[in-house]
Image: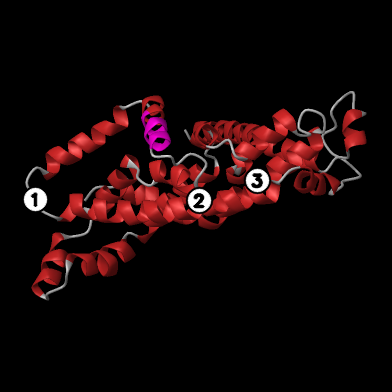
Amino acid sequence: MKAKKHIFAIIIYIFLSVWAVMVIFPFYWMLLTSVKSYGDYNSEYIPAFFTLSPTLENFAEAFTAVSLGQYFVNTLIFTLLTTALMLAVTIPAAFAFSRLEFRGRDALFTLYLALMMIPNELVIITNFRTITDMGLRNTYSGLILPSITSVFFIYLLKENFEQIPDELYKAAKVDGTSDFKYMMRVMVPICKPTIITITVLKVIECWNSYIWPRLITDDEAYFLVSNGIQEIRENGFGRENIPAMMAAVTVISLPLIVLFIVFRKKIMEGVSRGGTKG
């Protein structure tokens, strides 16, 4: 019996190791290509899995050939403002649905959840018409406004808030604590892992946003890094200088990789808390 368990465990570890290599390999290939010189890359008839003469000239090319630095600044502004506004909407909404008693609350929340069933394509079309009619194309407002709320994040945080005993809320009300103060001083600190989780997920969503920025902006002054990569591929050096293209992709991917590594434990804790009831 023990032999069968050991064999099964070995098979599982082999499968996981192979899967891990398959997942990590594209990132390794991206990084490897980014440090190969243009001449070395083009001279390889058979792709080499390592290089003995790495170079950083591709990174310099990525920043000088296009306005990659400006794309970074635009993306940072878009990401920070959108995430901050999302938290300002999500936390009070989750609190209201989980703690406040008002007529039609459950029915309203059910209708709200039903919005998740609407295809994103239909929402994008509606948002595009609305933002265009408001004259907000090629503005930060036009980029940010459609992204400041999320049904899934409100649902996740609501489920987390409901795990906090009602006795704490009743005791706080007896002491004369306002709902806002209770939310900020009690519920937010207790549910900090989940709030960090939705914050990180929103940052990743904003950083990787492509379709909406592509639709609503055609002015390079408002391009995000996703627009920038497409611009590099279509009109820049991307079709010819693949190592420089990979250098640009590496620079753009690095902040998200670092962010996930730093907050990975909080993300796992927040997801597990959100999925536990009682």
Judge left or right: residue 49 versus residue 200: right
* Labels 2 and 3: the sequence-earlier one: 2
Q: Amino acid at mark 1?
A: Phe
Q: Which residue is mark 3?
A: 252
Numbered circle sitting on residue 102? 1
Residue at left 65%, top 45%? 252
For label 2, the SS is: helix
Q: Which residue is mark 2?
A: 79
Tell which circle, 1 or 2, labels the residue nearer the N-terminal end.
Answer: 2
Note whether 6 is above or below 199 in the view shown.
above
The answer to whether 270 appears left or right of 183 in the picture is right
Q: Amino acid at mark 3?
A: Ile
Q: Residues within 10 Å of mark 2 (few under 14, many from 20)?
A: many
Residue 158 seen anywhere in this rendered image of the structure? yes
| Label 3 neighbour load within 10 Å: few <14, some 14-19, many 20+ | some
Q: Give how far across and how far down residue 91 sits, in percent.
A: 30, 55
Measured Cα–Cα span from mark 3 to mark 1: 46 Å
